[in-house]
Image (cartoon, helix red, strand yellow):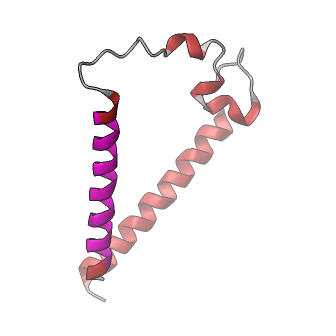
Amino acid sequence: MSSRSRLLKIVTVIVAVAAVAGAVYIMANGLGLSEKFDFGAGAYYYADIPGYENIVRDDTYKTGVPVWVHIVLFLCWGWLMYRLWVHIDGKK
């Protein structure tokens, strides 16, 4: 095992442990929660905010580009990321 590979694995483990520790800390201290909106586990999701459907409506986002163009671009991005994943996975 090369030193670069070993270093990458160590950094990966450190980042993963930090992410889990951060998530546990946030949940244990109730950070980001609003006391008046106690929805239990769903309290972390913005869709549980009362009246959310009035905040984000179809007429909020204006663009001259048709919706189908956004969908095609999204699918192209997904295909490119898939190809990148296959390329990276094939090198190992």
From the image, which quarter does the C terminus lie in?
Answer: bottom left
Asked if residue 5 is positioned above or below residue 65 in the image, the reply reads below
Is residue 81 rendered magenta in the image? Answer: yes
Tell me the residue at 74%/27% (across/down).
39
Which of the 4 quarters of the picture holds residue 27?
A: top right
Asked if residue 35 is positioned above or below residue 18 in the image, the reply reads above
Which residue is nearer to you in this view: 4 or 41? Answer: 41
Which of the 4 quarters of the picture holds residue 82?
A: bottom left
- Prevalent SS, magenta region: helix
Whether residue 17 appears in this view of the structure is: yes
Left or right: where does residue 86 sit relative to residue 35?
A: left
Asked if residue 70 is positioned above or below residue 75 in the image, the reply reads above
Is residue 4 rendered magenta in the image? Answer: no
Asked if residue 28 is positioned above or below residue 85 in the image, the reply reads above
Horizontal and vertical percent position of residue 28: 67, 40
Whether residue 32 appears in this view of the structure is: no
Left or right: where does residue 70 sit relative to residue 60?
A: left
Which residue is nearer to you in this view: 77 or 33? Answer: 77
Horizontal and vertical percent position of residue 83: 28, 65
From the image, which quarter does the N terminus lie in?
Answer: bottom left
Horizontal and vertical percent position of residue 69: 28, 35
Tell me the residue at 24%/77% (across/down).
4
Which residue is nearer to you in this view: 81 or 42? Answer: 81
Horizontal and vertical percent position of residue 24: 62, 47
Tell me the residue at 26%/73% (across/down).
87
Q: Bounds of the magenta span?
A: 69-89
